[in-house]
Amino acid sequence: MKVPFAILAVLCLTAIPLPARAQDSGADTYKAKCQMCHGADGLGNTPVGKMAKIVSLKDPTVVNATDADLFAVVKNGKNKMPANNGKLTEDQMTAVVAYIRTLQK
């Protein structure tokens, strides 16, 4: 039995692992890159968060920051927080900022 070329091509292409998916959700990226310090709830009550004196993501200074301000912090880092420029795509950083907003509610 011959397999049509188009079907074979689709099967082969779906078997190739793709690099970091740009469509990763902000929650997934947050859990992988931010949660160890900021905590699942964003309060910073983790061992690392306490040691680094991380400000809660619900703190008024963070809540009142613009999305552009938060994006800049995610991208460039701040104080002891490392930069994510080159580690995350712009879409992932934007999604993380959107996810942070959900934690603030």
Image (spheres, rainbow, N blue to C red):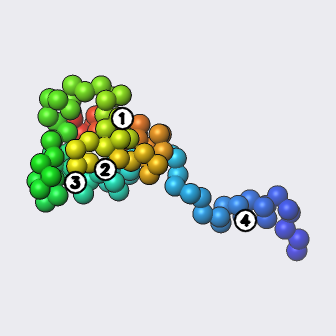
Where does residue 96 sit, x and y in percent of width and height?
Answer: 36, 41
- Badge 3: few (under 14), some or many (20 or more) residues near its Cα, within 10 Å? many
Q: State which tag comes first along the sequence, 3 or 2.
A: 3
Give the percent coordinates (x, y) of residue 32: 35, 56
Amino acid type, residue under disc 2 in the picture: Pro
**Residue at disc 1, secondary structure:** helix
Between the residue at mark 3 and the residue at mark 4, the CA separation in whole angstroms equals 40 Å
**Amino acid bearing label 4:** Cys
How far apart in space, not on screen, are marks 3 and 2 (Cα)? 11 Å
Residue hosting label 1:
71
The quadrant of the picture occupied by the N terminus is bottom right
Q: How crowded is mark 1: few (under 14 residues within 10 Å), some or many (20 or more)?
A: some
Q: Is residue 13 above or below residue 27?
A: below
Label 2 to label 1: alpha-carbon separation:
13 Å
Other-residue count near label 2 (Cα within 10 Å), few / some / many at <14 / 14–19 / ≥20: few
Residue that carries the numbered disc 2 in the rendered image: 82
Where residue 59 is drawn, which disc sits there? none
What's under tag 1, amino acid-wise? Answer: Phe
- Give the distance between the C-alpha atoms of the residues marked 3 and 1, in whole angstroms: 17 Å
Q: Which comes sooner in the sequence, label 1 or label 4? A: 4
Disc sitting over residue 12 in the figure:
4
